[in-house]
Image (cartoon, rainbow, N blue to C red):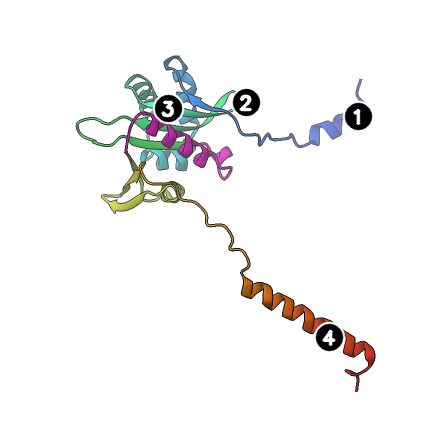
Amino acid sequence: MFSPATIIALAHRTPKVSTKSGPVRILATHELPLFRDHLLRLDRDSRRDRFNGSLCDDWVAKYAERSVHDGTVILAYFEDGTIRGAAELHQADLVNVEPEVAFSVESCMRRKGVGSILFTQLIAKARSMGYKKLRVTTGAQNDAMRALAGKFGAKLSFRHGESTGLIDLTAEPVKVAPKPKAGAADVAKAVGDYNRAAWRAWFNAAGFGKH
């Protein structure tokens, strides 16, 4: 039996939240309920950003079912067996020459790099399928998505309340330039500064710098 003090301590203890990255994999058709439940858990702002509007649960559930059965490739980010983020690759048709991508991340997983992980995996999948370009469409108010798309090279333009753009999959990935190494002039300056400081210290110790 726990003592009263132990019970109180356990009641007030803050549970630990796992920040460990979950696996990302392609969903199978029979996993529709997992994807549907993820979309239904999106809060009002996240749902508005994902679908460019606030839509009822019934519409979202039907959208999830349609996506799972129409050939859409869905990459899901799992946390403890639950989908917390998803990337969708809607394959090209007669209307859209390029395949279109869409992303959704639950608010509890924001600012943890989940979007970048999904974006990277989806681009790799699209390349493996032979696609050269991807189309990105998002609401004008979805700053996070526009910033993420820009990070991967999308050039977005605003039209009819939406931001749309293309990602060129044939281009080389953007790399961060390494910090430049010190050149000969920098080394010489550092040596000169050191020598001046050393002589100044010697003169001060000898009393020449005192008045």
* Residue 199 disc label: 4
Q: Position of residue 52 (x, y in %)?
A: 31, 36
User: What segment is highlighted magenta in the picture?
Assistant: 106-132
Mark nearer the viewer, 2 or 4: 4
- Is 206 situated left or right of 35 in this image? right
Point out the image quarter for the C terminus: bottom right
118 in the magenta segment: yes
Which residue in the structure is indicated by mark 1?
Answer: 4
Q: How many marks?
A: 4
Q: Secondary structure at mark 3?
A: strand
Element marked by disc 4: helix
Residue receiving disc 2:
80
Mark 2 or 3: the one toward you: 3
SS under mark 2:
loop
Please determine whether, in this image, residue 108 is positioned above or below residue 187: above
Q: Which type of secondary structure does the marked residue at label 1 adopt?
A: helix
Q: Which residue is mark 3?
A: 74
The disc labelled 2 sits on which kind of residue?
A: Asp
Identify the residue shown where x is 20% and y is 26%. Answer: 93
Three-letter amino acid code at disc 4? Trp
Q: Position of residue 170 (x, y in %)?
A: 31, 37
Q: Which comes sooner in the sequence, label 2 or label 3?
A: 3
Q: CA distance from mark 2 to mark 3?
A: 18 Å
Question: Which label lies toward us, 3 or 1?
Answer: 3
Task: Please identify, in this view, whether the residue under mark 4 or under mark 3 is nearer the observer.
Answer: 4
